[in-house]
Image (cartoon, rainbow, N blue to C red):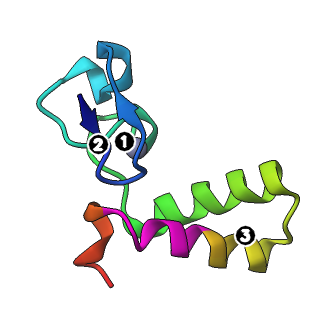
């Protein structure tokens, strides 16, 4: 089983992969509609929005939490 390099989600079924392409190292949630991987900024924004909703943080705190989570994932280590 693969883990998404950009968000850490386990990818098991074809539906977890962008466009059902199992050769990809990132999941459908980290892909753009065309199947390419989102940029650091795109992912940081969507993750911050998710954290704000799920944990009730304000936008500044949610952004910090999102960046901390992303800093532990292989896709973003090189970007930091
Ligand atoms: Zn992902």
> Is the Cβ of the residue at disc 3 closer than 8 Å to that at disc 2?
no
Circle 2 packing at 10 Å, graded few (<14), some (14-19), many (20+), is many
Instruction: Give yes or no for residue 57 being in the magenta stretch.
Output: no
Q: Quadrant of the N terminus?
A: top left
- Quadrant of the drawing holding the C terminus: bottom left
Q: Circle 3 is placed at which residue position?
A: 62
Left or right for 30, reference 75: right
Q: Quadrant of residue 64?
A: bottom right
Q: Residue furthest front?
A: 1
Q: Position of residue 78 (x, y in %)?
A: 22, 78
Question: Nearer the N terminus, badge 3 or badge 2?
Answer: 2
Residue drawn 76% across and 80% down? 60
Helix, strand or loop for disc 2: loop
Res 57 quadrant in image: bottom right
Residue 51: percent from the left, percent from the top?
71, 57
Real-space CA distance between mark 3 and mark 2, rounded to the nearest whole angstrom? 22 Å
Q: Earlier in the sequence, mark 1 or mark 2?
A: 2
Looking at marks 1 and 3 on the same chain, the residue that comes earlier in the sequence is marked by 1
- Please say if the residues under marks 1 and 2 sit with CB atoms less than 8 Å apart: yes
> In the drawing, what numbered circle is on residue 31?
1
- Left or right: 56 as drawn, with respect to 52: right
For residue 6, side relative to residue 75 (left or right): right
Q: Which residues are magenta?
A: 66-73
Looking at the image, which residue is at 28% across and 75% down?
77
Vertical order, 16 against 42 (above or below): above
Measure how far apart labels 1 and 3 are at the Cα level: 21 Å
């Amino acid at each position: 089983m693969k883990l998404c390099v950009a968000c850490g989600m386990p990818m098991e079924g074809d539906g977890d992969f962008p466009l059902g392409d199992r050769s990809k190292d990132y999941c459908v949630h980290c892909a753009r509609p065309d199947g390419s991987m989102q940029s650091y900024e795109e992912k940081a924004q969507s993750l911050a929005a998710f954290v704000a909703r799920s944990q009730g943080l304000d936008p500044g705190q949610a952004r910090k939490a999102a960046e901390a989570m992303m800093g532990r994932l292989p896709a973003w280590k090189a970007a930091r």
